[in-house]
Image: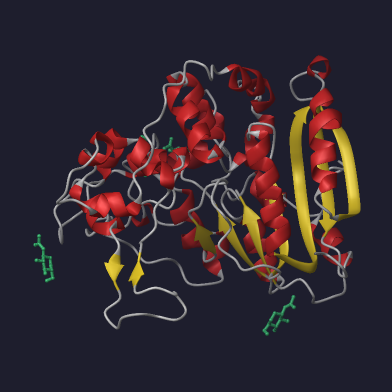
């Protein structure tokens, strides 16, 4: 219930706040250095103050049975659902009949439950010619997804693609080379080429998520190497040296910007998948062009891995106090779930305001069951000490024995 409610609240908040939340929902690599933008810590308050009493009751999402029941009487909430949405989500008979694994003879293709709350957007999203070209509507799809319509419904149309697509550079050059502009559909972004994205930290005012990330010769070059003096900046080598050599092989970087973490790990023969949104930049295309795997997944979605499987989960700047605390609680447990016993959770620069840390976040993180390998709390001073902002960088280990 909580996710739809939160999504609903997001939808009702002012445009500005929603826009900020959009910006903050992934790839927050460079947030802390942006001085023109107020910190997500300061977003906490308006977010908490959002009136719950004025929230009109949301129409209950129709049950799949109801949706499928197109011929009989429908309630008003399902009459407005687009026919392609109904076509996709309606139960479908398994052609070979009852299946023991399913324990059923039918299948209900899934979508995020809140999809049906955002009917206007959903109608536009599902409005296309079957077997034809999809609308070029990345912003609309992403907005739906971020609000909780995740997974998005599948569509029976071909997605927008560059007219003169250029193939990626071969490995290993692709890892550190700016990809061709013609590998991207630029419609959704302010910049219309990579040169503009690379320059924007110098030339453009205002906040953009991961603003300087596309410049592979800038800050990206030194991230997670041993070049920093700050105790909060662990290097990849420090982290890997904390465990038996060779035991970290596969993992996930949550909200990993342009996937420089995955690229560095690849050098060490470690396979990392990187989740990222496309917040005013073609993050997913860029990551793929570099030659590592992007996962287009928000922080709300259950991680698509089985229990006890990954060796490492890393997350920098994304897990922070902009996330509703209950959602964060579920999320950290989901990270614990997918890590194998002995697996590492590298919580890199979690940030919040001082009191929140002691009162809420520290007990929450400690309650999940990780062992602390490293735990460094530091002041975040870029916007002035009076704001009492904090960082936590932690290396946490799922217990090898008795982790259940
Ligand atoms: C789309 O293609 C399928 C497969 O050929 C066909 O059965 C269907 O009628 C087509 N739908 C439309 C609306 O053209
Ligand atoms: C890139 O886009 C900017 C404007 O955003 C434009 O001024 C510039 O000429 C473009 N550069 C290339 C190489 O297309
Ligand atoms: C980006 O900066 C470089 C060097 O400063 C310049 O040559 C290029 O034209 C700029 N590109 C855009 C799109 O502004
Ligand atoms: C990675 O794997 C390749 C091929 O198996 C091997 O040659 C190379 O030494 C490995 N690199 C590291 C850092 O282990």
Along the viewing direction, whichever of 68 and 302 lies nearer the viewer: 68
Would you say 75 lies left or right of 333 here?
left
Whether residue 234 is visible: no
Residue at image location 25% in from the left, 55% down from the top: 68
Residue at image location 73% in from the left, 58% down from the top: 336
- Count of residue discs: 0
Would you say 158 lies left or right of 398 here?
left
Whether residue 348 is visible: yes
Q: Quadrant of residue 209?
A: top right
Q: Quadrant of residue 359?
A: top right
Question: How does the figure colour the protein chain or chains?
Answer: secondary structure
Q: Quadrant of ligand 2?
A: top left
Q: Quadrant of residue 354?
A: top right
Q: Position of residue 111 (x, y in %)?
A: 39, 53
State the residue lying farthest toward the front: 73
Image quarter in which the C terminus is found: bottom right
Residue at image location 21% in from the left, 38% down from the top: 80
Q: Position of residue 82 (x, y in %)?
A: 21, 45
- Vertical relation: 247 (above or below) 369: below
Residue at image location 30% in from the left, 61% down from the top: 165
Along the viewing direction, whichever of 203 and 74 lies nearer the viewer: 74
Would you say 15 lies left or right of 257 here?
left
- Vertical relation: 216 (above or below) 322: below
Q: Position of residue 19 (x, y in %)?
A: 47, 27
State the residue lying farthest toward the bottom: 96
Q: Position of residue 203 (x, y in %)?
A: 51, 28
């Amino acid at each position: 219930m909580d996710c739809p409610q939160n999504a609903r609240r997001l939808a009702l908040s002012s445009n500005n706040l929603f826009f900020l939340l959009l910006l903050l929902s992934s790839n927050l690599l460079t947030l802390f250095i942006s001085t023109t933008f107020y910190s997500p810590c300061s977003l906490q308050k308006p977010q908490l103050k959002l009136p719950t009493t004025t929230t009109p009751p949301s129409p209950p999402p129709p049950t799949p049975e109801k949706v499928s029941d197109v011929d009989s009487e429908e309630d008003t909430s399902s009459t407005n659902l687009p026919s392609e949405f109904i076509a996709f989500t309606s139960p479908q008979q398994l052609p070979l009949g009852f299946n023991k694994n399913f324990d059923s003879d039918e299948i209900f293709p899934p979508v995020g439950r809140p999809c049906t709350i955002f009917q206007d957007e959903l109608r536009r999203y599902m409005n296309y010619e079957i077997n034809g070209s999809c609308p070029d509507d990345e912003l609309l799809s992403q907005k739906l997804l971020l609000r909780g319509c995740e997974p998005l419904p599948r569509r029976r149309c071909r997605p927008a693609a560059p007219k003169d697509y250029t193939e990626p550079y071969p490995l290993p050059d692709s890892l550190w080379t700016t990809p061709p502009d013609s590998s991207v559909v630029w419609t959704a972004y302010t910049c219309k080429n990579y040169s503009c994205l690379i320059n924007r930290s110098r030339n453009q005012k205002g906040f953009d998520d991961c603003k300087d990330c596309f410049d592979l010769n800038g800050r990206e070059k030194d991230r997670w190497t041993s070049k920093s003096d700050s105790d909060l900046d662990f290097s990849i080598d420090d982290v890997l040296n904390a465990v038996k050599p060779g035991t970290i092989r596969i993992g996930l970087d949550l909200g990993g910007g342009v996937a420089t973490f995955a690229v560095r790990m690849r050098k060490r023969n470690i396979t990392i998948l990187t989740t990222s949104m496309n917040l005013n930049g073609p993050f997913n295309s860029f990551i793929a062009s570099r030659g590592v795997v992007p996962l287009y997944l928000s922080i709300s979605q259950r991680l698509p891995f089985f229990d006890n499987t990954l060796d490492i989960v890393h997350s920098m700047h994304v897990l922070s106090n902009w996330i509703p605390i209950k959602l964060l609680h579920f999320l950290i447990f989901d990270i614990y779930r997918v890590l194998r016993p002995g697996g590492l959770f590298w919580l890199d620069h979690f940030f919040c305001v001082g009191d929140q840390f002691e009162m809420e976040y520290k007990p929450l993180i400690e309650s999940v069951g990780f062992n602390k390998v490293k735990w460094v709390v530091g002041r975040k001073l870029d916007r002035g000490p009076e704001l009492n902002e904090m960082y936590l960088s932690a290396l946490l280990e799922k217990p090898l024995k008795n982790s259940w």
